[in-house]
Image (spheres, rainbow, N blue to C red):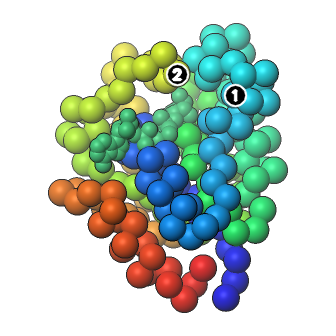
Amino acid sequence: MTLRNFAFIGPRGAGKSRLSRKFAKRLDRLLLSTDTLISYEAGGLPIRDIVAAEGWAGFREREYRLLEKVAGMPAVVIDCGGGILVDVDADGSEYFSERKAALLREKCTTIYLKRSVQWLLSRELDSSHRPTLAADYEAVLRRRLPWYEKAADYVLDLSGRDVNEGIEELLFHFRDKS
Ligand SMILES: Nc1ncnc2c1ncn2[C@@H]1O[C@H](COP(=O)(O)OP(=O)(O)O)[C@@H](O)[C@H]1O
Ligand SMILES: O=C(O)C1=C[C@@H](OP(=O)(O)O)[C@@H](O)[C@H](O)C1
Ligand SMILES: [Mg+2]
């Protein structure tokens, strides 16, 4: 039995944080949230404030540096922020983050929590901790969804199913592989 770690990826609001907490508990593993650790390292500043101060480029850089530290830890569950596969260029345009994808590929079993575009749009979350991504959130989703597919070792489609069913599927699929 190897002690490979798990990383959850997927768009904002897919349920990564909630599911990964339950999953880590079932496996009795340590759960690490990239968002929470980035905030903590920034002296407790909410992500919204980090982005306001440093721009998305600053936040993506923090995300990369944090992922470098946690991706190789053995036997942990990593709850990634929705933009873990994103970097931004000088004019603020998003592109696929090969450097963060490479860390996930090399060091983690990456699970994509898949939801339909309609489901995600109907639940787009408005919270003081989640800075607005763009006026056209659907365009953001359509650009990013293929990136999650590309980076995933396993796709967990939660359409019409609850979190517990999803966890049972993962425990079954990875029963001899984790
Ligand atoms: N399956 C679900 N059923 C009901 N509420 C959910 C479910 N998954 C997530 N939520 C709620 O939706 C919100 C976003 O979930 P969260 O786990 O934070 O998503 P993510 O980390 O992918 O952005 C939270 O308020 C959470 O309580
Ligand atoms: O999609 C994104 O770019 C982001 C998603 C957020 O995490 P959740 O997916 O947990 O909401 C958080 O990392 C930050 O606000 C940026
Ligand atoms: Mg989250």
Residue 24 lies left or right of residue 143; in this view the side is right
Secondary structure at numbered mark 2: loop
- The residue identified by callout 1 is 39
Q: Quadrant of the N terminus?
A: bottom right
Q: Position of residue 67 (x, y in %)?
A: 73, 48
The residue at 76%/53% (across/down) is 70
* Quadrant in the rendering for residue 140: top left
The residue at 54%/61% (across/down) is 25
Residue 25 lies left or right of residue 35; in this view the side is left
Is 52 situated above or below 18? above
- The residue identified by callout 2 is 129
Is 14 situated above or below 133? below
Q: Position of residue 5 (x, y in %)?
A: 66, 67
Disc 1 residue type (three-letter): Ser
Q: Position of residue 52 (x, y in %)?
A: 63, 11
Mark 1–mark 2 distance (CA, rounded to whole Å): 10 Å
Callout 1: few (<14), some (14-19), or many (20+) C-alpha neighbours within 10 Å?
A: some
Please name whichever residue, 73 or 31, is drawn nearer the observer in this view of the structure.
31
Residue 57 numbered tag: none
Disc 2 residue type (three-letter): His
Q: Is residue 158 visible?
A: yes
Is 102 situated above or below 28? above
The residue at 63%/54% (across/down) is 31
Residue 166 lies left or right of residue 86; in this view the side is left
The residue at 70%/77% (across/down) is 3
Residue 137 lies left or right of residue 3; in this view the side is left
Task: Say if disc 2 is inside 8 Å of ligand 2.
Answer: yes
Tell which circle, 1 or 2, labels the residue nearer the N-terminal end: 1
Q: Is residue 91 visible?
A: no
Q: Position of residue 48 (x, y in %)?
A: 58, 17
Residue contact between numbered discs 1 and 2, judged by CB atoms under 8 Å: no
Please name whichever residue, 100 or 25, is drawn nearer the observer in this view of the structure.
25
